Amino acid sequence: MSTQKTNSRKFSKERLMNVLLAPQISEKATYVAEKNEQVIFRVATDATKPEIKAAVEMMFNVSVDNVQVACVKGKAKRMGRLIGRRNDWKKAYVCLAAGQEINFAASEQG
């Protein structure tokens, strides 16, 4: 528990509030959550692993074992003759400690 306090002290609270953008809720995300006890978040493109860990620990009061990060390339989309491109984004696979859980369905109803 002492590491949780030291991690959140390294970064400003304002920065940690802007690191996590949204949870990724999809079939793959629920499969990963059940099998590997991980939660997937959409995070800021300049976020680092220690920042993501500190932000999850601060916002949800859980202990995080490790964080894996993947950069997702934006898709090229066509609208008639025009070709556009969606922005690149970053997602984080957050592995929670044993017995820890984040339930998004309960927070939406409340």
Image (tube, helix red, strand yellow):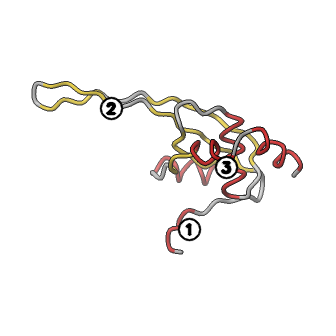
Q: Quadrant of residue 83?
A: top left
Is residue 59 toward the left or the right of residue 10 in the image? Answer: left
Q: Considering only order in the chain, which callout, 2 or 3, is on the residue closer to the N terminus? A: 3
Give me the C-alpha separation between circle 1 and circle 3.
15 Å
Q: Residue furthest right?
A: 2
Amino acid marked by disc 3: Val
Task: Label 3: state its secondary structure.
Answer: helix
Q: Are marks 1 and 3 in contact (CB under 8 Å)?
A: no
Give me the residue at 78% from left, 38% from top: 10
Residue that mark 1 sits on: 107
Q: Position of residue 85 (x, y in %)?
A: 29, 27
Q: Is the residue 76 above or below the residue 2 in the image? A: above
Amino acid marked by disc 2: Arg
Give me the C-alpha separation between circle 3 and circle 2.
27 Å
| Crowding near the residue tagged with mark 3, few <14, some 14–19, many ≥20 C-alpha atoms within 10 Å | many
Residue that mark 3 sits on: 56
Q: Considering only order in the chain, which callout, 2 or 1, is on the residue closer to the N terminus? A: 2
Residue that mark 2 sits on: 86
Give me the residue at 46% from left, 30% from top: 72
Give me the residue at 46% from left, 33% from top: 89
Give me the C-alpha separation between circle 1 and circle 2.
30 Å
Q: Position of residue 3 (x, y in %)?
A: 85, 45
Q: Position of residue 15 (x, y in %)?
A: 63, 42
Task: Label 1: state its secondary structure.
Answer: helix
Which of 6 and 96 lies nearest the eye of the viewer?
6
Q: Quadrant of residue 95?
A: top right
